[in-house]
Image (cartoon, rainbow, N blue to C red):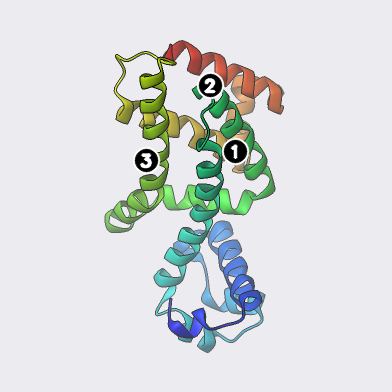
Amino acid sequence: MTYTFQNLPQEKQNRILRAAGDEFARHGYENAKMSEIARAAGVSVGSLYKYFDHKQDMYLHVIHSSIAEMERLLVILSQTQDDILLKAERIIRAIQGFSRDNPLLIKLYSGAAAQNDPVMAAHFAREIETATARIYCQAIREAQEAGDIRKDIDPDFSAFLLHSLFMMLQFSYACDYHIERMKLYAGEETRNDFVVKQMLKFLKNGLR
């Protein structure tokens, strides 16, 4: 991202990022076209290359922006003194709502997580996981100190398992394959309350 892009009016920045996010989510990084992004955003292709050095630069910025939205939500939900299962319930419900309201962002996240390029995959792993790992690790350690959950589980690996579970839940409300996959296991019982109750029972048995 260049200073030229940063100096654009916020409305124009948002319009370009929305167009880029839609194109990357629908077609993936390799097949996304800068010409389509420019058309949808109402700017020229030449202008896009003044705002971003190359397609990868734009892709990374879009990924970062989409991840930041979910991170802000998780930080707010995690900064309470509530029991860890109550925190988990709030996060699960937030994930359900966010995923249904922002399916293209979740598809973009899914595409980034499935990158075949080792360099890109490593970059996205650091970008995507760092903040969530910190949030979940902290919540688990605090719960152990408060006696809310068992002390014989490793907080770091437990955070990995917790985030993996939540990540799959995100995909299951936004990505066609994962939507159908959840139906195979839950039938049509994919409404909010059923999923929340079942996930909390699963977490309770694992954490306590």
Q: Is residue 67 left or right of residue 16?
A: left
Which quadrant of the structure image shows residue 27? bottom right
Q: Which residue is mark 2?
A: 85
Where's residue 170, x and y in %?
Answer: 56, 39
Dot placed on the residue nearer the N-terminal end, 2 or 1:
2
- Callout count: 3
Q: Which residue is mark 1?
A: 95
Q: Residue at x 51, y 61 (%)?
A: 65
Q: Nearer the viewer, mark 2 or mark 1?
A: 2
Residue type, mark 3 in image:
Arg
Q: Residue at x 44, y 83 (%)?
A: 3
Q: Residue at x 50, y 44 (%)?
A: 75
Identify the element where label 2 is drawn.
helix
For the residue pair 75 and 66, the one nearer the viewer reads as 75
Dot placed on the residue nearer the N-terminal end, 1 or 3:
1
- Residue at mark 2 to residue at mark 1: CA–CA distance: 15 Å
Identify the element where label 1 is drawn.
helix
